[in-house]
Amino acid sequence: MDFQFVKDLITKGLPDAYVEVTDLTGTKDHLGILIVSDAFEGKMLIQQHQIIMDLLKDSLKKEIHAVQLKTLTKTKALNQGINIK
């Protein structure tokens, strides 16, 4: 799995998103994904995750076995000390 491909899928749907993708198991099909976007403002966590899953659904069927999502607004990311570039 090309991590840049995953980033591109997410940023195509959420143009303001900061995205980090990590390989959780060394197999490149279990991914940890951090997404920071103001599109999550006012949305419940399940709604935030649904936005991302909708963007990834076609790839999940073919190439990704599992994902661990962390979704934050830009303000929450900064408050948690996450440096978004």
Image (tube, grey):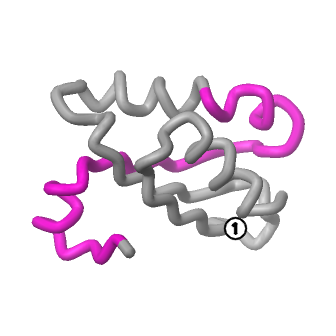
Pick the residue in front: 12 or 72: 12
Left or right, residue 82 beside residue 34: left
Above or below for 62 versus 57: below
Q: Check the picture and name the quadrant holding the C terminus.
A: bottom left
Q: Residue drawn at (67%, 68%), measured in percent from left and top?
A: 23
Position of residue 2 measured from the top left corner of the image (x, y, whole percent): 81, 61
Left or right, residue 57 beside residue 10: right
Position of residue 39 measured from the top left corner of the image (x, y, whole percent): 32, 35
Question: Which contiguous range is marked in magenta?
Answer: 55-84
Left or right, residue 77 beside residue 79: right
Pick the residue in front: 23 or 74: 74
**Is residue 65 found inside the magenta-colored segment of the image?**
yes
* Residue situated furthest front in the rendering: 15
Residue 76, by quadrant, is bottom left
Position of residue 61 measured from the top left corner of the image (x, y, whole percent): 82, 29
Q: Residue drawn at (59%, 24%), measured in percent from left and top?
A: 54
